[in-house]
Image (cartoon, grey):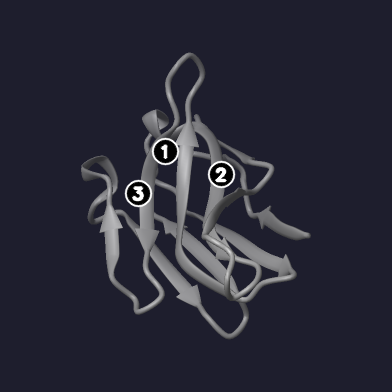
């Protein structure tokens, strides 16, 4: 079994910072892309940032210059440093990873349980 466990959400004032972390554990042969998605109330889930196994990064336009995604392949972790937070960043943030559990199995998407980020004064 594979688990993605997130931590680091909370309440922060506009302009503040938060750091989200996610650790993958379980029966893992390889991990391709890892990333963060978010879903605000009444909206669809959207990609925030993603990083490949070789370190290529992709960001949503709305967070470019403010958020930074990083990854530690040895520890099977991914983090999202969020600076200059805005009220519109308020959402549940989900960790995602494309994981192969056995060498001959296909990649499959795994999700964390979600962590709430609220930006409000």
Q: Residues within 10 Å of mark 2 (few under 14, many from 20)?
A: many
Q: Could you tell me how far apart the alpha carbons at marks 2 and 3 are, in whole angstroms?
A: 20 Å
Q: Nearer the viewer, mark 2 or mark 1?
A: 2
- Marks 3 and 1: CB-CB under 8 Å? no
User: Foreground residue, 96 or 39?
Assistant: 96
Q: Nearer the viewer, mark 2 or mark 3?
A: 2
Q: Earlier in the sequence, mark 2 or mark 3?
A: 3
In the depicted structure, whether residue 68 falls above or below residue 9: below
Q: Could you tell me how far apart the alpha carbons at marks 3 and 1 are, in whole angstroms?
A: 7 Å
Q: Earlier in the sequence, mark 3 or mark 1?
A: 1
In the rendered image, which quarter is residue 83 located in? bottom left
Which quadrant, please, contains the N terminus? bottom right
- Marks 2 and 1: CB-CB under 8 Å? no
Q: Position of residue 3 (x, y in %)?
A: 73, 57
Q: Residues within 10 Å of mark 3 (few under 14, many from 20)?
A: some
Task: Please tell me the numbered disc located at residue 94.
Answer: 2
Q: Secondary structure at mark 1?
A: loop
Q: Residue at x 27, y 58 (%)?
A: 58
Q: Residues within 10 Å of mark 1 (few under 14, many from 20)?
A: some
Q: Residue at x 41, y 75 (%)?
A: 53
Task: Please tell me the numbered disc located at residue 84.
Answer: 3
- Residue beneath disc 1: 14
Q: Secondary structure at mark 3?
A: loop
Q: Secondary structure at mark 2?
A: strand
Q: Residue at x 51, y 18 (%)?
A: 41
In the depicted structure, whether residue 98 falls above or below residue 13: below
């Amino acid at each position: 079994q594979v688990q993605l466990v997130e931590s680091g959400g909370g309440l922060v004032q506009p302009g503040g910072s938060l750091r989200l972390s996610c650790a993958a554990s379980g029966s893992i042969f390889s991990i391709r892309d890892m990333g963060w998605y978010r879903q605000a109330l009444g909206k669809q889930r959207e990609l925030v940032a993603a990083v490949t196994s070789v370190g290529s990064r992709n960001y949503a336009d709305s967070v470019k210059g403010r958020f930074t995604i990083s990854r530690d392949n040895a520890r099977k972790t991914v983090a999202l440093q969020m600076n200059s937070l805005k009220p519109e960043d308020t959402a549940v943030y989900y960790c995602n990873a494309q994981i192969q559990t056995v060498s001959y199995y296909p990649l499959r998407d795994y999700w964390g349980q979600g962590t709430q980020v609220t930006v409000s004064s």
